[in-house]
Image (tube, helix red, strand yellow):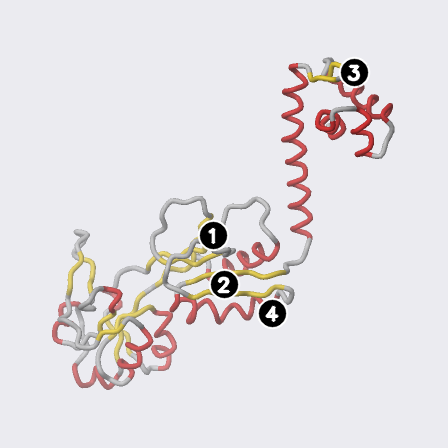
Amino acid sequence: MEIFVAVVEAGSLSAAAERFDISAAMVGKHIRALEARLSTRLITRTTRRQSLTEIGRQYYEQCRQILADVKTAESLAEAMAASPRGLLRVTAPLTYGVEVFAPAMTDYLSAHPDVSLELDLSNRITDLVNEGFDAAVRIGRLPDSSFVARPLVPYRMRACASPAYLARAGTPRTPADLAQHECLGFLHWGREGAWRFDGDGDGKAVTHTRPARFRANNGQALKVAALRGFGLIMQPEALVAKEIESGALIPVLDAHLPPGAPVHLIYPRDRRATPKLTSFIDFVMERFGAR
């Protein structure tokens, strides 16, 4: 097939012979053997020119595709056998990246010393292809796209306050109790920063807090205020997990909080994925994949 395709593309037996460093007679022998096997004429030859028969044209197109697939398969096998190396560019949301993702990346890099990692932490939606990223972590529901999306552990929220605040103001037992509490506002939820909970299964959001006196667009700033005993916060578990574990913050209303937001690792659909990307995907799914 390779010789037949070369004859068609080079335009003559002799030109194809040069490509394979064999004689023109040997090229002709390959073509005749191919035609004998197929029991049909593929090339019509005269002393001045050659042309494809109708069957020859169709066979040529199929051969090109088959040979391309063979090269793809060989490249994939070679890539899988090679060790991961090169620069890996990944993007993730800010808080998730700082608190969850970045600490694990040193483990990945330690396991793959020939790989370097560039981690872009931003809450904007990046364009993976145009901005040259290999993979991204996305929180929330995904639009339909051509990317591969692998589910990770959901992004859960926690409501909490310092022991000093709860001793002074009391512990809320239901979302309605929050109307009597100082609830710190997150500006990404709106200018008032009010906390919102799902309604009684009707799909409508319900606000249970009064307008926040202290609002910020950064969860770390709100956590500092909560640690100082100013009020309650509702922030991602990733941001407050260490403080909850140490007792510096006490969780409240766990039974009333919405389920965690979906998290996915996304990457372009490419049948020739590089070893560095394949190893990274395997690591992330082992460490953070949804069980």
Judge by depth and name the residue closer to the eye, 12 or 33.
12
Indicate which disc, 1 or 4, sits on the residue closer to the N terminus.
4
Disc 2 marks a residue whose amino acid type is: Arg
What residue is shown with label 2?
287
Task: Name the side, left or right, on which 280 lies relative to 221.
Answer: right
Kindly identify which residue carries mark 4.
Answer: 110
Q: Residue furthest front?
A: 48
Q: Locate residue 253, reporting x and y percent.
A: 23, 69
Q: Quadrant of residue 11?
A: top right
Kindly indicate whether the residue at mark 3 contacts the one at mark 2 (C-beta within 8 angstroms).
no
**Which structural element holds mark 4?**
helix
Mark number for residue 115? none
Say if mark 1 contacts mark 2, CB within 8 Å: no
Badge 1, how many Cα within 10 Å: few under 14, some, many 20+?
A: few
- Which percent across, then down, holds residue 22? 86, 31
Identify the disc placed on residue 48.
3
Amino acid type, mark 1: Asn
Q: CA distance from mark 4 to mark 2?
A: 15 Å
Q: Is residue 209 above or below residue 259?
A: below
Q: Where 143 falls versus 27 (above or below)?
A: below
Amino acid type for the residue under numbered disc 4? Ser
Mark positioned earlier in the residue sequence (2 or 3) = 3
Tell me the mark number nearer the camera, choosing from 4 and 3: 3
Q: Mark on residue 130?
A: 1
